[in-house]
Image: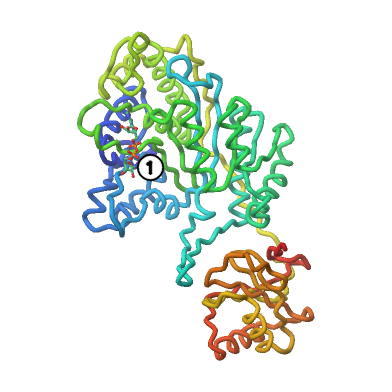
Amino acid sequence: MSPSLPLVTVAPGDGIGPSLMEATLRILDAAGARLDIRTIELGEAVYRAGHASGIAPQSWDVLRDSHVLLKGPITTPQGGGYKSLNVSLRKALGLYANVRPCVAYHPVVPTRYPGMDVVIVRENEEDLYAGIEHRQTDEVVQCLKLITRPGCERIVRYAFEYARRHGRRRVTCFIKDNIMKMTDGLFHRVFEEIGAQYPELQRDSLIVDIGTARLADAPQDFDVIVTPNLYGDIVSDVAAQIAGSVGMAGSANIGEHCAMFEAIHGSAPQLAGRDVANPSGLLNAAVLMLLHLGQAEVAQRVHNAWLRTLEEGLHTADIFREGHSRQRLGTQAFAQAVVQRLGREPQILRPARFDAQGPLQLPAPARRAPARKQLVGVDVFLHWSGSSPEPLAQALRRLTPGLLGLQLITNRGVKVWPHGLPQTFCVDHWRCRFKAANDGLRFDEVLDLQARLHQAGYEVIKTENLYHFDGEPGYAGVHG
Ligand code: NAD
């Protein structure tokens, strides 16, 4: 095959995956997609062969060479020890943006929201998905939520650039910065900073709970939504569900060097081998891939032939409706029907018009000059099985003469000393905040404090240094 063709890695996946991939590739081939395809195995068989993340070591090289992966759905085996392949792929290939168009195909596919056309841009690498979890005490486990400025800048910039390229009007940010003032607050701030560089685009922000409720109620009011990882996970499923397109939507996972395209549905093992599943989700993912590869004209031909097939009532079983559909087709027959309609356009549904695209070229997030950072205190987390904070506070105060004074104690984030309420339910995990009397705290004083606590029999399970950055506190205050 000609070396000028773009290398594409194809992983058929599990369950219905191989059949959907066969159907999709048949359509791409007939439409004239220019691809140099390498096939790898991912998923169940690889897991069972002893590779805990569902991918064999040699497949990483194929993936990194080709930069583009078209992936069928994967069955994650039940039981412990198996890692999510999708999470591994996202992290290893740096796929920071998950882009999921959620479109209603009214009147072909039933939906309560005929005009819906929303794109969810989800941050894909950070947040609670960093996988940093610890059991700290008998009663407490924690999961760290990591939000970084470069991570926010990349995803927010991606959302605005995406909106600009696709002629969208508005970008909405979903966050929860009324509660998570520092992490979600940073996401929100970056959204405002970068959004200001796109004056032609409207922007607004909503707290994720009310935002999701409004999306579910009036999706036509939304255009592009950008949001951190966990909210994005939930919001994108809500959006796909109400669009009526769970079985038909594709998504793109975009990184600086690599990109992965897949349907949003799973491997539907109960349908495997029966030639009944709908290949539309994977086909739509392939359309996103063609756009990424700069083959907009082929993408448009495929998409319009697919729309035409749908509106002619040629449907797979999942969307077949008696009296409405014309013919129930199996997976491969549906693919054949799309192939036969290549070059035709839909008459009822809006035809696709794709411009020459290619990957969005984004500037690297700018590195900022480091802030002036000053150590001002430390939060010490103790595993302590007493029930009342008062004796703990008295003991800690006796142990910490000198510069570091005990300022407060919280339990599950609720202040219990000083002036706590006896009704507050407490577990065996106490956050004790020590602050320096003046500004010049040294780290060895923090170590000295820990040594004193240890010698006095307290179990220090973790510490968090308290810093000022350019004079501003780099830690959340405590209410109450
Ligand atoms: P699923 O998406 O496989 O199935 C949900 C429902 O949708 C089922 O009724 C199924 O029959 C139907 N369905 C899904 N795709 C269809 C299609 N193309 N045509 C017709 N009907 C379709 O979700 P699940 O049952 O929760 O998961 C099954 C397996 O898939 C699990 O092992 C899960 O971990 C995996 N999964 C993988 C991915 C992925 O690889 N990205 C995503 C989701 C689930």
60 vs 459, nearest the viewer: 459
Q: Is the residue marked by circle 1 packed among few (<14), some (14-19), or many (20+) residues within 10 Å?
A: many
* Rendered residue at 60%/26% (across/down): 218
Up-down relation of residue 318 to residue 84 (above or below)? above
Q: Answer whether residue 451 is visible to the viewer in this image.
A: yes
Image quarter for residue 10? top left
* Label 1 beta carbon less than 8 Å to ligand 1: no
Up-down relation of residue 223 to residue 39 (above or below)? above
Q: Image check: 43 left or right of 362?
A: left
Q: Which residue is mark 1?
A: 69
Q: Which amino acid, mark 1?
A: Leu
Residue 277 location in percent, x, y? 29, 28
Residue 352 location in percent, x, y? 50, 20
The quadrant in which the N terminus is found is top left
Residue 177 location in percent, x, y? 66, 50
Q: Determine the quadrant in which ligand 1 lies.
A: top left
Image quarter for residue 138? bottom left
431 vs 199, nearest the viewer: 431
Residue 184 location in percent, x, y? 64, 52
Q: Answer whether residue 256 is visible to the viewer in this image.
A: no
Q: Residue furthest front?
A: 423
* Rendered residue at 53%/32% (across/down): 357
* Rendered residue at 66%/70% (across/down): 416
Up-down relation of residue 445 to residue 354 (above or below)? below
94 vs 120, nearest the viewer: 120
Q: Image check: 419 left or right of 235?
A: right
Secondary structure of the residue carrying tag 1 is strand
